[in-house]
């Protein structure tokens, strides 16, 4: 066998072994395709999961996609504790409940974009992603007179195309590092414990506006967090707008 052929075979074999090792590593750690790329340096874009800060400051947020039975009670509870938050809205929710959208805005809360039709946006073209953003944006702006600047992807699903399209349209992409799991069949006590135990400075907490026990768990969580010295602000007031980079876990770090 010629020397050049042996080198080619050895090189090919080595590449196959490295690829196999990476795939096995991804499987061991339970990484999906996007996380695999990110973990091994091929992906560059991450949404904001939390913020690096020495202040005891956090943001709580509500995703609005289904129903409005609990929206008014939520607003009254937030008023009672003098807390402002972020509500991420899907276009069809805003279209169905425009009075709620306006009431949320009038009470001083931030309104974020949560897409037009709540699809998995990693499966969409850049053009369709942009249409999803613009559709919800137009409806929110029509009701409130203000364009949203933060976006939460449905299902928490993201990729480079999504994040780049959002950035090109003036949005910061927001995830969360504390999930209340309030949509599951959990007790009030379990939800309160889950949130208060996992919150840390710079956290972003995920709630839903139509969760069954929200009137019970929300006051307990707000009381516990404020007693612990946390200041609760809208997402847009927590995140950095410039001069930052993202660490491997999606935490915003100051340059």
Image (cartoon, helix red, strand yellow):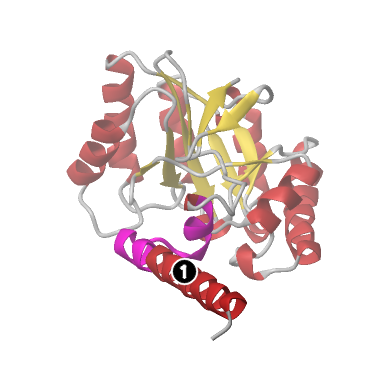
Q: Residue furthest bottom?
A: 1
Which residue is at 55% across, 28% downward? 234
Quadrant position of the C terminus in the picture: top right
Q: Which residues are magenta?
A: 24-38
Left or right side of 47 for 135: right
Q: Quadrant of residue 77 in the image?
A: top left
Q: Nearer the viewer, residue 32 or 148?
A: 32
Which residue is at 47% across, 59% downward? 36
- The answer to whether residue 67 is visible is no
The question of residue 26 being in magenta is answered with yes
Secondary structure, mark 1, is helix
Which residue is at 29% across, 37% downward? 195
97 versus 3 height, above or below: above
Magenta stretch, main secondary structure class: helix
Residue 34, horizontal then vertical, whole percent: 53, 60
Left or right side of 236 for 125: right
10 versus 253 height, above or below: below
How many numbered discs? 1
- The answer to whether residue 151 is visible is yes
Residue 10, horizontal then vertical, whole percent: 49, 73
| Residue that label 1 marks | 14
Residue 125, horizontal then vertical, whole percent: 75, 68
Left or right side of 23 for 243: right
122 versus 215 height, above or below: below
């Amino acid at each position: 066998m010629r020397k050049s052929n042996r080198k080619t075979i050895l090189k090919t074999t080595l590449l196959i072994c490295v690829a196999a090792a990476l795939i096995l590593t991804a499987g061991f750690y339970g990484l999906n395709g996007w996380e695999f790329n990110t973990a091994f340096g091929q992906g560059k874009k991450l949404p904001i999961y939390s913020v690096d800060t020495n202040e005891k400051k956090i943001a709580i947020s509500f995703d609005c996609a289904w129903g409005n039975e609990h929206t008014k009670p939520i607003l009254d509870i937030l008023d009672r504790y003098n807390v402002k938050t972020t509500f991420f809205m899907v276009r069809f929710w805003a279209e169905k409940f425009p009075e709620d959208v306006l009431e949320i805005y009038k009470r001083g809360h931030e309104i974020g974009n949560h897409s037009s039709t709540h699809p998995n946006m990693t499966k969409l073209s850049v053009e369709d992603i942009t249409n999803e953003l613009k559709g919800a944006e137009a409806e929110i702006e029509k009701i409130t007179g203000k364009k949203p600047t933060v976006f939460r992807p449905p299902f928490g699903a993201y990729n480079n195309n999504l994040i780049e399209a959002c950035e090109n349209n003036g949005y910061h992409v927001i995830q969360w590092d504390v999930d209340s799991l309030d949509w599951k069949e959990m007790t009030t006590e379990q939800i309160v414990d889950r949130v208060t135990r996992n919150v840390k400075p710079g956290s972003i907490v995920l709630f839903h506006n139509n969760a069954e026990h929200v009137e019970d768990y929300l006051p307990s969580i707000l009381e516990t967090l404020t007693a612990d010295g946390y200041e609760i602000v809208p997402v847009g007031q927590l995140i950095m707008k410039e001069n930052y980079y993202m660490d491997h876990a999606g935490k915003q770090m100051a340059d």
